[in-house]
Image (cartoon, helix red, strand yellow):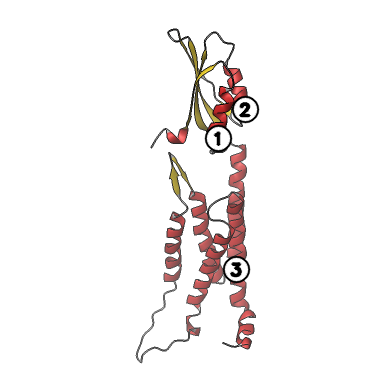
Amino acid sequence: MTFDSLVSALSDTDAMLPLLGSVIAGALIGADREFLGKPAGLRTHALVCFASALMTLLGLRMAEWTVVFPEGTQIVSDMARMPHAILTGIGFLGAGVIFRSGISVHGLTTAASLWLTASLGIVFGAGLLELATISTAIALVVLVFQRTLRRISPPQPVVRIKVAVNAESSYDAARLASLLAAQGLRATSPSIEHERATGLRRYTLLGSAYKQDINAESLARAIREDAAVQELSIIPLENEIG
């Protein structure tokens, strides 16, 4: 390797454009994951896409390898093996970002984006720059559209709330719903039970929100500030099963 050979390699557009394109594509998709605070972000996606393109180029340029084979050696080249090997390896990486919490499974979209990023790297490495560029744009549209759709879709129930108050108090479901709204939760229609033996009126309802990470401690303190509240139970729905 010499300085002139390095300059010559850098001016080889057949190699440099796919590598540069793979880094940009991986960074763009990774930026979306980074923005959402996912475990695999910009750097991970950029490196996965770049590595996939690099390994694909390596296989395509096998004729340029510096290697000495014993006399009579026969070489059979099957480029279908390289994408298969890359995507198999990415499967292990994707499994590392998937985890289960209660009844919820997290990280599936990030794992899919890693798999897609590796696929884009393969396409870039194969020299199909137009196809890779269009595919990157489509992937970004899907990721952004998914977030937009989630914003306009109805919020999902995330917590079950049970409140018991003095039956003679003026506390009602509207007051509880107003308090939940101040905490970023939308209350469903409550069920109401009256217990003559204990003199309590019980409300059971679901709190709905767009996000899963509800601060149960803060919510409990806000509800217990009302002297009418005698009993309180806050159960994240993800903990009800499993």
Classify mark 1: helix, strand or loop: loop
Q: Nearer the viewer, residue 145 or 88?
A: 88
Q: Tell me if mark 2 has few (under 14), some (14-19) or many (20+) residues whose alpha carbon lies within 10 angstroms of its own.
A: some
In this rendering, which labeled residue sits more in front, label 2 or label 1? 1
- Residue 188 occupies which quadrant of the picture? top right
For image coordinates 60% across by 66% down, the residue present is 23
- Residue labelled with disc 3: 129
**In which image quadrant can residue 14 be found?**
bottom right
Q: Where is residue 127 in the image (x, y as percent from the top left)?
A: 56, 72
Dot 2: element: helix
Front-most of residues 102 and 90:
102
Distance between the alpha carbons at the discs numbered 3 and 2: 50 Å
| Mark 3 residue type | Leu
Pair 1/3: label in front: 1
Q: In which quarter of the image is the C terminus?
A: top left
Picture coordinates of residue 186, whole percent (x, y): 59, 28
Residue furthest out toward the bottom: 71
Instruction: Pick whichever of labels 3 and 2 is earlier in the sequence.
Output: 3
User: Mark 2 — residue?
Assistant: 181
x 57%, y 31%: residue: 218
Q: Is residue 130 visible?
A: no
Left or right: where does residue 118 sit relative to residue 27? left
Question: Element at badge 3?
Answer: helix
Q: Percent position (x, y) of residue 189?
A: 54, 21
Name which of mark 2 and mark 1 comes first in the sequence.
Answer: 2
On residue 215, the disc is 1
Q: What residue type is labelled 2?
A: Ala
Query: Spatial distance from mark 2 to mark 1, Cα to Cα?
Result: 14 Å
Q: What is the distance, in whole Å, between disc 1 and disc 3 at their CAs? A: 47 Å
